[in-house]
Image: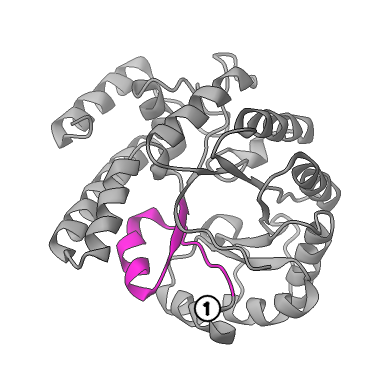
């Protein structure tokens, strides 16, 4: 399918209340925050959204809420449907098409891992077939899924087996492989970049779009980075990229997902705590984090 993601797509958090239950009333605030910061595509229910810590019923409810909030706005929604259970993944994909999402994506099963490329593609094909009217993106994030196959080879096989194949969400720091994928079959595939810390490098290789978690809370920095790169101002682009890297490494030190959700709270978007096995920050740690962010100029 000829569908291209350009610019920034935010991989959104799943909002919980203090007890760790879904708090879907916050989705409207999340959507408003994204659009006010120049982001018009939300990638929901992915890694940032703690997908593997959600039940199928919760994921279906999350999609339903996002689609209701986005209806009538400029916001597009991509639904991550990947699951260790393919029937769950197919249910999520079918719902995404029914409710009007712009695309679906899917991690491969990663507990009982596929042993061959053909098996990976077969799993993708089942999910994609449940939403034949939407572009399908394979979600390659081997650092977390531990499913690691050549995306150059995947593109070639998936293009033959999946009629609605759109491309790969490339959350893999292998820029050599990314470059080869960009030029596969004369550049026919969409390959949104998924490693925020290397966005500038990916742009240099030819990336046109990116999907990432830190675009929720540093969109302005990344917009400036991309504008500087496009104008040939590499000094500014490098400066902005380094700033985002320093912030990301600070959050990693506290526990990335929980710390990022704490940052969203600081910005007035109360997405709540993370679920176990993620560990949340104590009130003292949240205050320390705020002070370190202030020192770095994050709130300027």
Q: Is residue 53 magenta?
A: no
Crowd tier of the residue under label 1, counting other residues whose Cα lies within 10 Å: few below 14, some 14–19, many 20 or above: many
The image shows residue 205, relative to residue 26, as above or below, that is: below
Q: Residue furthest front?
A: 72
Determine the residue positioned at 41% across, 73% down.
175
* Up-down relation of residue 162 to residue 17 (above or below): below
Of residues 284 and 36, the one drawn nearer to the viewer in this rendering: 36
Q: Position of residue 158 (x, y in %)?
A: 72, 75
Q: Is residue 3 left or right of residue 32?
A: right
Residue 124, placed above or below residue 251? below
How are the colours assigned in the image? one colour
In the image, is residue 287 above or below residue 149? above
- The answer to whether any part of residue 83 appears in the image is yes
Q: How many marks?
A: 1
Q: Which residues are magenta?
A: 189-211
Residue 203 located within the stretch drawn in magenta: yes
**Image location (x, y in percent) of residue 11:** 51, 44
Specify whether 206 is left or right of 275: left
Q: x, y percentage for residue 137? A: 65, 61
Task: Locate residue 92, reporting x and y percent.
Answer: 77, 44
| Residue nearest the viewer, comparing 194 with 71 | 71
Q: Secondary structure at mark 1?
A: helix
View extreme (bottom): residue: 185
Residue 300 appears left or right of 16:
left
Residue 166 lies in what quarter of the image?
A: bottom right
Where residue 216 sits, quadrant-wise, is: top left
Please identify the quadrant where the N terminus is shown.
bottom right
> Nearest the camera: 289 or 90?
90
Q: Residue at x 78, y 71 (%)?
A: 163
Judge whether residue 23 can be spotted in this image.
no
Residue position for label 1 = 181
């Amino acid at each position: 399918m000829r569908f291209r993601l350009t610019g920034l797509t935010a991989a959104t958090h799943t909002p919980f209340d203090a007890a760790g239950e879904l708090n879907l009333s916050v989705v409207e605030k999340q959507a408003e925050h994204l659009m006010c910061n120049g982001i018009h595509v939300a990638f929901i229910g992915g890694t940032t959204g703690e997908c593997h810590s959600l039940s199928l019923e919760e994921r279906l409810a999350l999609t339903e809420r996002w689609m209701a909030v986005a209806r009538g706005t400029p916001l597009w929604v991509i639904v991550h449907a990947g699951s260790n259970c393919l029937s769950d993944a197919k249910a999520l994909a079918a719902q995404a098409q029914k409710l009007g999402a712009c695309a679906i994506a899917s991690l491969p099963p990663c507990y009982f891992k596929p042993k061959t490329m053909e098996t990976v593609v077969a799993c993708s094909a089942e999910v994609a077939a449940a939403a034949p009217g939407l572009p399908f993106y394979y979600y390659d994030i081997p650092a977390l899924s531990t499913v690691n196959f050549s995306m150059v080879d995947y593109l070639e096989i998936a293009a033959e087996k999946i009629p609605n194949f759109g491309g790969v969400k490339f959350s893999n720091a292998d820029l050599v492989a990314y470059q080869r994928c960009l030029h596969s079959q004369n550049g026919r595939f969409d390959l949104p970049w998924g490693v925020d810390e290397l966005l500038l490098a990916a742009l240099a290789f030819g990336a046109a779009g990116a999907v990432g978690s830190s675009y929720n809370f540093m969109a302005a920095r990344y917009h400036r980075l991309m504008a500087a790169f496009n104008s040939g101002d590499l000094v500014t682009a490098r400066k902005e990229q380094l700033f985002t890297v320093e912030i990301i490494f600070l959050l990693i030190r506290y526990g990335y997902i929980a710390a990022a959700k704490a940052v969203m709270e600081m910005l007035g978007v109360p997405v709540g705590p993370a679920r176990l096995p993620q560990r949340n920050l104590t009130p003292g740690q949240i205050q320390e984090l705020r002070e370190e962010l202030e020192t770095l100029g994050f709130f300027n």
